[in-house]
Image: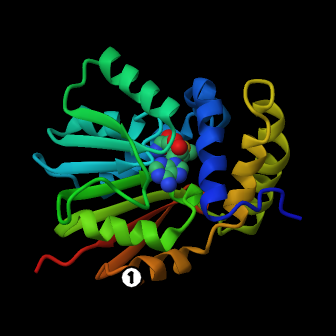
Amino acid sequence: MPEFTHQGHEKKEFVRKMFDDISPSYDFLNHFLSLGIDIYWRKRFIQKLEIKDDYSILDVACGTGDVGFEILTNHSVSITGIDLSPKMVKLAHEKAQKKNMENITFIEGDAENLPLDNNSVDCLTISYGFRNISNYESALTEFYRVLKPGGKLGILEFSKPKSKIIGIIFKLYFHHILPRIASFFSRSDAYRYLPESVDFFPSRHDICRKIIYSGFQRAEIHDLTFGISTIFLGFKDGK
Ligand SMILES: C[S@@+](CC[C@H](N)C(=O)[O-])C[C@H]1O[C@@H](n2cnc3c(N)ncnc32)[C@H](O)[C@@H]1O
């Protein structure tokens, strides 16, 4: 039986409060529980986006800002990070100051109601945030709206591994080991929500269909590490 059945506004409030509560240990647990592989996944994600200098980038569900910081280490672009959780935004802002990174700003906001003009960004990224959104379709419609013609959408998200054996090992770790370790450091239900939200996430092909139905002309799927994580790309036509 699923434990986290929140939907719509209730899901949004649950998610906002949960990420506020886990924000102090978020970075540490991310790297510790994934044995650092999350850093590699974000790097591969950014490579796939083929970012060009002078791009304006919107990083939705930016969390503590790691996607934006990684992009800025190799590219001369301007980035806005947006997140529902005020505490994650505050941490991202403090990290940017410590790193002396100037071309990045962080604001509080909702993926389903972006405070940006139509056709205003070259690239929109969302890493491990899409699964947490209440209404996937309305977020994708917003992503399409704010992207310039010729713009790119990149979604990085957990998936169900394609190999049966890896799937069993992953499930054991994700459902039984990870929540127990995380409960020593953080709000324990957050790390029971994580595997459940992956279990109930639509299939790769359903996500691609949603991308296309939202207006994107083309969508691609790229699996990482046995399909534990997946990169989805969406392309908005240039004309
Ligand atoms: C697992 S974290 C991912 C953070 C970061 N992108 C990363 O790669 O580490 C998910 C983030 O999504 C944010 N989030 C969830 N729903 C959102 C929404 N509707 N709009 C904006 N941010 C949202 C949460 O507040 C949280 O910071």
Image point 59% across, 54% down: which residue?
A: 12
Q: How crowded is mark 1: few (under 14 residues within 10 Å), some or many (20 or more)?
A: some
How is the protein colored in the picture?
A: rainbow
Q: Does the residue labelled 1 lie within 8 Å of ligand 1?
A: no
Residue 91's place in the image compared with 153, above or below, is above
From the top left corner, tell me how far across and down residue 99 is, in percent: 31, 19
Q: Which of 186 and 156 is in front in this view?
A: 186
Residue 21's place in the image compared with 151, above or below, is above
Q: Can residue 229 be seen in this view?
A: no
Instruction: Look at label 1 and name its amino acid.
Output: Ile
From the top left corner, tell me how far across and down residue 37 is, in percent: 55, 40
Image point 60% across, 38% down: which residue?
A: 19
Residue 159: quadrant of the picture? bottom right
9 relative to 83 in the view: left or right: right
Q: Nearer the viewer, residue 54 or 143?
A: 143
Image point 10% across, 80% down: which residue?
A: 239
Residue wearing tag 1? 212
From the top left corner, tell me how far across and down residue 139 is, in percent: 43, 66
Circle 1 SS class: helix
206 relative to 145 in the view: left or right: right
